[in-house]
Image (cartoon, coloured by chain):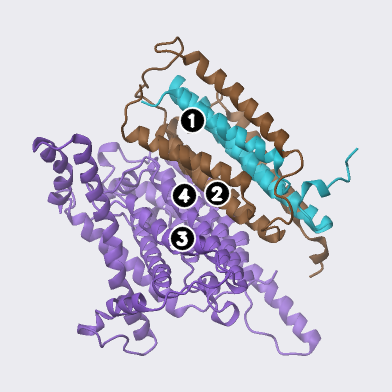
Chain colours: A cyan, B brown, C purple
Amino acid sequence: MIPLWMYLLVAALLFCIGIYGVLARRNAVAILMSVELMLNAVNINLVAFWRYLAPQDMSGQAFAAFVFVIAAAEAAVGLAILLFVYRTKRSVIVEDVNLLRW
Amino acid sequence: MIELNAQTIAFAILSVLVLGGGLGVVTTRNLVHGALWLVLSLLGVAGYFVLLSAPFLAAVQVLVYIGAIAILIVFAVMLTRSMTSLGEVRNRQWWLSAITVILLFLLLAVGIILPVWGRGAPGEVTSLSATVGGAVELGEALVAGDGFVLPFEVASILLTAAMIGAIVVARDEEDEGA
Amino acid sequence: MTSCVDFINTLSPCLVRAGWNADLANLLSLLLGVVIVATVPLLTVILLIWIERKFAARIQDRIGPNRVGPYGLLQSLADALKMLTKEDITPSGADRILFNLAPIITFATVVLIWAIVPFTPLHIGADLSIGILYFVAVGSIGAVKVMIGGWSSNNKYALLGAFRTIALIVSYEVPMILALLVPVLMAGSMGMQDLTRAQGGMWFIVMSPLAAIIFFVANLAETGRSPFDLLEAESELIAGYNIEYSGFKFGMFMAGEFMHVFTVAVLTAVLFLGGWWGPFVDQVPALGFIWLGLKTAVVYLFMLLIRNTVPRFRIDQVMNINWKFMVPLSIVLILLQSFLLRLIDALGLRPAPELANDLLANLPQTLVLLAGNLVLGAIFMHLLQRHGRTLREADEALAVVKGEAAPAGGMAEA
């Protein structure tokens, strides 16, 4: 049997990779992809906890399903905003989008 | 320790997929490659779901993430002509981010491993229960009055709003006359 | 036939008794099963290409392949050999790894679907509890392979073709999944064997013809066959996303496409035409294979007939008919179907469990569902007709203004 902590460790590593991508990448599409990685890391945790600690209670799976919904909505709206930004700024580098910067 | 069987081997391969794909996403210069690394990573996560006896979530993962989100990202990459992002891949504070992230990971790892350090530590799950809720139970939980019916409805409204919002935001107003 | 699966099931205990490692024996028997399931479509595709070419030839008043082997049966083999000997070109500037990956994914996704096809009551690759969802998930990888193939070729026509193909695949996935929910509603399960078993009394095509039609048309579009072959419209795009492929790689794309069509025919037969159900299947389960084959052949020949007789749609027409007709129809259909199923339960028309496979006991609920479907279909056809008339009149008015003769047709102009 695979111990629970191994799933958690992989999820933590994936989450950290995602954070690094969000913080260090300049391209907005890459940042969105990194956010997806973070959401997936959370999903691994949710499903792993569900399986090991409460396999009859469906909360873990239900939460994972809601994360899917959030991810889909986030990707659709995020990419739409990106397209709009690209149309006005001709760039998807986040540092160029500084109109609201204080 | 951990015995070597089909499950452990599968877990090892999937971990390589998940983490390798993740690293590919954050390091590659070519964003189409990045999206495909993302697909690889997400496939690995779907494999985890199968290992964790949640086949329904695995199928939904493939359907939603690979069939929809990854494709959407590839489309966005091509439409914004940012296939190979010009200039630097990373911004100026990337080393700062790297250090922060490594520290964060160490913190998380300590938090994960410390509770189960040593054999038979309290809180460690030693055997999995054989009865697992499946797609039917999930469906019932999602629409049960004492379950998730309210979040479920909110989620559907969120999806509708996101769909309309995405269309409105992404629509090219200059092309409207045509 | 039954001995075959018994052979696989008994193989691993036999080997263990002979002193093998249990894991290894299990792996070997599983591997054998996988090879058998994967080989069936691979072998049939060679025959299918011959059938398709003969069929098209007859429709076009030709004879078709008739030189290699009796009745030209070996023509496909000869073509395959020719493909193997052709030069394998990778365009300069192409993404080499992805370029070579795309044909493999194409082939793999189609073969993977065969894991859940129930051949007989006893034979199925893997009777997953989420069988249908697995089919949809594997099918959605199809969009990825198109994207990889079109982008990695480094060719603008290939990329445009890929964009079109993906727009089509993603759009038609919506009504297809919604139509698939109708059999799931009626069987109360997503497993392929459960879905087939639920059709013992009455086929789902009778209980919900609209779902069957939507599923069939959506799948026609997914396979990219005529009338939805605007993906490879020679006059506009040259050949679609696989334009740069040659030799064996192109062969894999082509074989994958042929197999996809056949797979769709099998799934239609399983989901709506009762799968392996047929006379005497209770006594001899292996007969199910033949019944399924016959039903698949009917669906497949119908698809060939459509391919060879219906002209190509324009891309705007294809998108209009999907989003403005098929998606609303399938959503209303699901609402109607679940309402009718509740109504049937309330009226006590559902047959008792022990009579579930009896034709007469199933008749009342079938009639209710069929009537609901027909009424819904009639309403939507009426709406479609009215919409078409409005468009036609607008066209004619425009033509009068311009002083021209009215143009012909034009089903949906947005």
Q: Which residue is mark 4?
A: C137
User: Where's residue C65, x and y in %?
Assistant: 30, 85
Disc 4 residue type (three-letter): Ala
Q: Are marks 4 and 2 on the same chain?
A: no
Which mark is in front, 4 or 3?
3
Q: Are marks 1 and 2 in contact (CB under 8 Å)?
A: no
The residue type indicated by label 3 comes to Leu
- Callouts 1 and 2 on one subunit: yes
Per the model, the C-alpha gap separating discs 1 and 2 is: 35 Å
Q: Same chain for labels 1 and 3? Say yes or no.
A: no
Foreground pick, C24 / B79: C24
- Separation of residues labelled 4 and 3 (CA atoms): 19 Å
Question: Are the residues tagged 1 and 3 within 8 Å (C-beta)?
Answer: no
Query: Gap in Å between the C-alphas at discs 1 and 3?
Result: 41 Å
* Badge number at residue B140: 1
Q: CA distance from mark 2 to mark 3?
A: 14 Å
The type of residue carrying mark 1 is: Glu
Looking at the image, which residue sits at the far right?
Answer: A102
Query: What label does residue B37 carry, if any?
Result: 2
Which image quadrant: the C terminus of chain B? bottom right
Which of the 4 image quadrants contains residue C151?
A: bottom right
Q: Which residue is mark 3?
A: C101
Q: Left or right: C78 with respect to C14?
A: right
Helix, strand or loop for disc 3: helix
SS label for mark 4 = helix
